[in-house]
Amino acid sequence: MLKSALKIAVLFLFVGCSSTQKFSDYSFKTKKDKESYTKAYNNALKLWDVPYTEEDVKTDLGTAHVVIAGPKNGKKLVLLHGMDASSTMWYPNIKALAKNHRVYAIDFLMEPNKSVYTRNSIFTGISPSANEIVKWYNEIFDHYQLKKFDIVAASRGGWVATLLATQKGNSINRIVLLSPAQTFKFIDKIGKTSSALMLKLFPSEKKFGKTLTTFSTHPEKISPLYKRQFYLANKYAKSNSSMLKMMPFSEKELESIQNPVLILIGDHDVINGEESIERAKKYLVNSETRVIKDAGHFLSIDQSKIVNDAMVDFLK
């Protein structure tokens, strides 16, 4: 009888511990939060008006989630999204980009999306170094055997694309930078971006609306499905320390980039101004710059037709 009681006690402890086991995910505090966000991500991804597949790639820092579209024999094109935006942000552009390219849209680590950061728990909360970011992307490129591929990158993704282009022996061909953040200089209008900081600290629908108005000249063009996902991303996102490591590139680093580069910046962008454009012209030896009228930081949505035409023409 004593043995039976002990067995029941052990079973109770085992079941009890299992049922109350703490949910573990870098980007989300609870399983419910993750499920809510994932549902919104899936709904937003349906806005892609082309056939696509989703794949997960195992890397040293975790699992990279990649959304793939376009003809298999098309030239390879990598898409790098902005902070907390995820690969779904390309819904106004994907049809144009995937017409002749095999597109690989990669979700960044340490943010609410479908990539999963699983680095050793000792380092949890510390963002990857620049070298680790390069290594992470190269693992993905190697997995898909990408050689002489193009890159289209927005905001923080633009900084990452520039970082990758500064690496000797990289396999990148042409690069399109859409209002790259912290790439040529620090944030242009720091005061106007305070709404985004307040949204991170105290998330609310009202603050989210102000943030969209700050970063977009046409927030009414943003799909409600994407708005929902983007709001949840900002709500659940942790203070992204990787942003603090994003230093503008030096003259020498920029001059080392020989790739053809197209830089598109909105005339109402709060991240980049004239100084960014002039620095890009001066130090990127093989670059073109263009200001997109009536567009903010979210220029790929604000003026998608104009931006799509410019990107496709440059990538030909």
Image: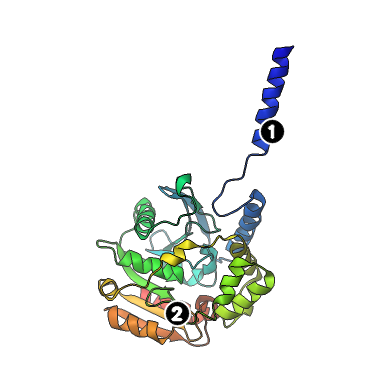
x, y percentage for residue 149? 34, 64
As drawn, is 219 to the left or to the right of 131? right
Q: Give the residue type at disc 1.
A: Gly
Residue farthest toward the right in the current orientation of the protein: 1
**Residue 46 in view here:** no
Residue farthest toward the top in the current orientation of the protein: 1
Q: Nearer the viewer, residue 96 or 234?
A: 234
How many numbered circles does the render carry?
2
Q: Quadrant of the N terminus?
A: top right
Q: Residues within 10 Å of mark 2 (few under 14, many from 20)?
A: few
**How far apart, in angstroms, are the residues tagged by discs 2 and 1?**
58 Å
Q: Give the residue type at disc 2.
A: Asp
x, y percentage for residue 115? 50, 54
Callout 1 secondary element: helix
- Residue mark closest to the camera, 2 vs 1: 1
As drawn, is 150 to the left or to the right of 17? left
Q: Residue at x 51, y 85 (%)?
A: 268
6 lies above or below 48: above
Which residue is the site of mark 2?
309
Which residue is the site of mark 1?
16
12 lies above or below 158: above
Q: Residue at x 56, y 58 (%)?
A: 112
x, y percentage for residue 16? 69, 33
**Residue 134 in view here:** yes
As drawn, is 99 to the left or to the right of 257? right
Q: Can you tell which quarter of the image residue 233 is in?
A: bottom right
